[in-house]
Amino acid sequence: MPIALPRRALSRTASIASLSLLTGCDFSDHGRVQAALARVSAWNDRVQAALFNPHKLAPTFAADRAVKDFRYNAWYGPDQAPALDAADYRLRLAGLIENKQPWTVAQLHALPQQSQVTRHVCVEGWSMIGEWSGTPLRVFLERIGADLTARYVGFECADGYYEGMDMASALHPQTIMAFRLSGEILPRKYGYPFKIRIPTKLGFKNPKFVTTIYVTNQQPRGFWTDRGYNWFSGI
Ligand SMILES: Nc1nc2c(c(=O)[nH]1)N[C@H]1C(S)=C(S)[C@@H](COP(=O)(O)O)O[C@H]1N2
Ligand SMILES: [Mo]
């Protein structure tokens, strides 16, 4: 996938920074090397967030470019994917939100919706164009009286996954609560009743089977960030 020049320059700067930090370290001191790398990654997050243009759109494609048999991904097989039932599903809201009433699937489906044909990029080395439809997260956050001046939005998922993003990314016009894939109600393994579809970020920043949305000023943890990946992960 094409990477914008400034990003490439940025990652080169980051590796030079990590190199000079590393050479100042005792290589046998694993803890200190890890801490130095963590500092570079946190710095990288801050620079990426500062460079993020909230108005710049991710590329979109003609509808016939969307793959129908979309690739599935999680750390477990599709048969183990949570099977959420509309009868008892409730989306829980927490944190800096005025109206924390839980939402049913029917209420979510009644929200205004839009479609996007965008590329999903997985850090494991594959990418695929898909068509997702749903409600802009911005519309939902406004509807529930979320504090839009707060710094972050966090997500918890039915499979124990968790993610979060900065408020500017959450309010980006292409960040949606996706209820449909290829026009069909989102199948179970792809995150029923909805996934957060954010085409300006890597695949792992797109949480599926979301059960809680919260608004906070503390940076939410991320499942893969806790396992070494960069938190901001814009593309
Ligand atoms: N709840 C949950 N969300 C998740 C994941 C997961 O394991 N659990 N995996 C992430 C990763 S790494 C990718 S690439 C995409 C895969 O989504 P897909 O199955 O629709 O392709 O979901 C992301 N969101
Ligand atoms: Mo991924």
Image (cartoon, helix red, strand yellow):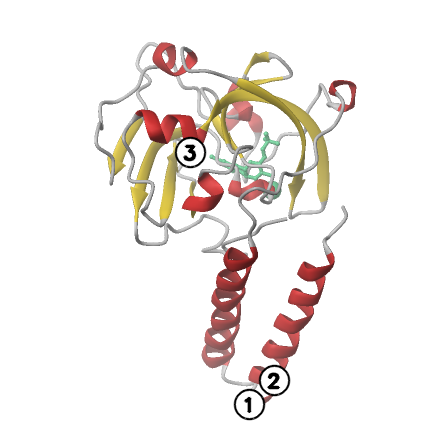
Question: What residue did someone put label 3 on?
Answer: 159
Question: What residue did someone put label 1 on?
Answer: 24
Indicate which disc, 1 or 3, sits on the residue closer to the N terminus: 1
* Secondary structure type for disc 3: loop
Q: Where 197 sits versus 55, above or below?
A: above
The quarter of the displayed image where residue 97 is located: top left
- The amino acid pointed to by label 2 is Ser
Q: Position of residue 36 (x, y in %)?
A: 49, 77
Question: What residue did someone put label 2 on?
Answer: 20
**Badge 3 residue CB within 8 Å of ligand 1:** yes
Q: Quadrant of ligand 2?
A: top right
Which numbered marker is on residue 168? none
* Secondary structure type for disc 1: loop
CB under 8 Å between callouts 1 and 2?
yes
Single out the residue that lies furthest toward the front: 55
**Badge 1 residue CB within 8 Å of ligand 2:** no
Name which residue lies at 22% across and 28% down.
100
CB under 8 Å between callouts 1 and 3?
no
Q: For label 1, count other residues whose C-alpha is less than 10 Å away and answer few (under 14), some (14-19) or many (20+).
A: few
Q: For label 2, count other residues whose C-alpha is less than 10 Å away and answer few (under 14), some (14-19) or many (20+).
A: few
Name which residue lies at 48% across and 62% down.
46
Q: Where 187 sits versus 15, above or below?
A: above
Q: Position of residue 173 (x, y in %)?
A: 53, 33
Look at discs 1 and 3 and give the one toward the viewer.
1
Q: Where 171 sits versus 6, above or below?
A: above
- The amino acid pointed to by label 3 is Asp
* Secondary structure type for disc 2: helix
**How far is disc 1 from disc 3 in space, using C-alphas?**
41 Å
CB under 8 Å between callouts 3 and 2?
no
